[in-house]
Amino acid sequence: MRVSIERLTKRFGKVVAVQDLSLEIMDGEFVALLGPSGCGKTTVLLTVAGIYRPTHGWIRFDGKVVNDLPPRERNIGMVFQSYALYPHMTVYENIAFPLTLRRMPRAEIHRRVVAAAQLLQIEELLDRRPGQLSGGQQQRVALCRALAKEPDLLLLDEPLSNLDARLRLLARAEIKRLQKELGITTIFVTHDQVEAMTMADRIAVLNQGVLQQFDTPEALYTRPANLFVAEFIGSPPMNFLEGSLTVHGSALRLTGPEWHVTLPEGLKSWAEAVRDRDRLILGVRPEHVRLAPSEEGELRAEVYVIEPLGRDVLVNLRIGSLRLRALVPPPFPWKVGDIVGLHFDPAHLYLFDPHTGVLIGRS
Amino acid sequence: MRQVERELEVAKRGRGFSLPLLRIRPGVSKQGVAALLFLSPAALIVLLFFVAPVLLTFWISMTNMSVATLGRTEIIGFSNYLRILRSPYTSRILQNTLLYVSATLTFNVGMGLILALLTTHIEERVGVLFRALWLLPRVTPSVVYALLWTWATAPAPFGTLNQVLGPLGLPSRNWLTTQPWGVIILANGFVGASLGMIIFTSAIKAIPPDYIMAAQVDGATTWQIIRRIILPLIRWPIMFVTAYQTLSLLASFEYILLLTEGGPGFYRTEVWALYAYHQALSNYFGNVQFGFGAALAAVLVAIGVVASVIYLRVFRFQEMMSEPKIEGV
Ligand SMILES: Nc1ncnc2c1ncn2[C@@H]1O[C@H](COP(=O)(O)OP(=O)(O)O)[C@@H](O)[C@H]1O
Ligand SMILES: [Mg+2]
């Protein structure tokens, strides 16, 4: 089913939870709503589910406006952040509940419950009550209840946030596989950019109820629309260097209090176009910072903290009051307090407007 | 099989199944003393104000103590109980009690539930106001409240009820003599429902909203949500209110006393507790029979205990105790 959210605004009294949000979700697509806690993700989900009514705007299913359709007529499967398994029912009764409400024949209900339980490998839990299940089991049961009704749309509200790290990794892959296998249009809410990046076809990044960017994971990583997305997507987050533009012969430089960076060819034309701006922000991801002996680098920085991650080493660096992060391959030959030289990969630099936060251009 | 047994054996010897922590030491442990200390105030109150009076009542019920025999009270065994069994009024009073308790209980719990459900499904401020209004009778002294009912149900042209019904073309009546039970049950119910209302309201509000939203998404109508989610989740408060009100209704008689005094006519609305009161403390004929009254009261205690046990069974109290959590994927 195709889901269109058109100019959706949702207010609770004076609080604007969602503002003028438009998203077009294709049939069978897996879309993640990504943003920090309190940015309105759950509100969007509950509005799509029909629990909340839009203050302004429209929700369309396959082109038809459903603003006035009660939740029970929407054929939606939803997994709540708390899982919301009915504590007085067994797992079987939980999964069967939506089906019994449709007055389905008993045999058909049984068939569907067992099939869904097999799909999620929870057959041996059917007689238990939710209180007797671990977090991972509860999550599966909740997903099973949502899928057994064969919904046209699957809504998942932070389904992995109550799981431990190991289980989260497993469930991540499993949900992704299941979604592709069943081909159900899915909206997945998360505050974890890794989850969104690894699972979704497209990601809608929200901040304070406002859509920042709606694009594929690759596009969000390579072409973040603004500072918020640039910082939110990618781990560890992008480094930002704010300075003013200065001309040195044919070269353009961004100059800060204790440093200056010569802009590479790829950024020059963008910078020239905004020469009237007094200040600009240069963005560079930690994986695009290279370290060198102190006399070789374009910048000089002090090693502040070293965090070995196994596959990489995350180095915190200091240039005066400026902090930078670099992700470099091991072994790491320096120690805390050493002065090292830095290069920025000229092919992966970003230029942002400090006032609006908008991306001006990238090399 | 063999290997498992061997491993078990090793485990037993290795870890030593005689861990001192697992052994229950004879006598009272330090923990036991602390538990007793914490329990003692409550236990003392129960002993002093429940067990002691019950024992005393039982003892008096074995005597022929009355105004007439005050100086020469004798132990007469179970004669008072035999008298209850043989009395021609017993079955009538039992029926009255059953009617009074079951009808008032149904009204109290049912109305309490309806009020709680209604006021939690409408706008918050209106709900609060509505509930506050329903609390008024409870904060009114019983005598004043009963007096209001006698005024309301007085014969025309004084009674409010008749004045309201008159213009609608309904004949005026003396409600207290023609419909004594109706008036008694409503008078009790309007006070009694507020307890259920308050407890059920807070229980409904304590249900996580996620359950309700999940049920909505699952396809439930408001009525289905009430019946299949809300009611099962507030089963424990419903049981508590039902049991509590049964017991308090069994023992209560003040509104009957104030409204009809067991009449009109002979024992028309006399319930067990009122009968005991009349016999033991306020006999029509001046002969106050403490012994017989005490026997009646003792029977009431027995009925109350039996009713409590039945409630615990019917509502499967054991099952409501939380079950152990089993971890694992
Ligand atoms: N039912 C509600 N009543 C009032 N305010 C709400 C309600 N639901 C959400 N909000 C507010 O709307 C904002 C967005 O909340 P929510 O959608 O839950 O965020 P998220 O799921 O992204 O953490 C928050 O400021 C929250 O306080
Ligand atoms: Mg949320």
Image (cartoon, helix red, strand yellow):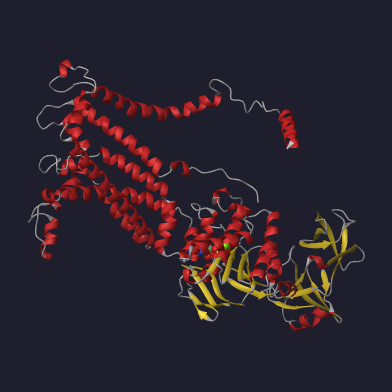
Write the residue at 80% across / 56% down. A309
Instruction: Name the foreground residue: A126 vs A252.
Output: A126
* Up/down of B39 relative to A281, above or below: above
* Up/down of B75 relative to A74, above or below: above
Q: Indicate the quadrant containing the N terminus of chain B: top left, top right, bottom left or bottom right.
A: top right
Write the residue at 66% across / 66% down. A178
Instruction: Name the foreground residue: B182 vs B206.
Output: B182
Q: Quadrant of residue A139?
A: bottom right
Instruction: Residue B12: give x, y in percent of width and height.
Output: 71, 30
Instruction: Specify whether A140 is left or right of B128.
Output: right
| Residue A171 seen in the figure | yes
Instruction: Specify whether A83 is left or right of A332.
Output: left
Q: Quadrant of residue B261?
A: top left
Instruction: Name the foreground residue: A350 vs B125.
Output: B125
Instruction: Name the foreground residue: A340 vs A3.
Output: A3
* Up/down of B317 relative to A136, above or below: above
Instruction: Residue A290: give x, y in percent of width and height.
Output: 86, 66
Write the residue at 43% across / 43% down. B316
| Count of marks, rendered view | 0
| Residue B138 seen in the figure | no
Furthest residue in direction top, as rendered? B72
Q: Quadrant of residue A242?
A: bottom right
Furthest residue in direction left, as rendered? B157
Instruction: Residue A235: give x, y in percent of width and height.
Output: 74, 63
> Whereabouts is ligand 2, in terms of quadrant?
bottom right
Instruction: Residue B63: give x, y in percent of width and height.
Output: 21, 21
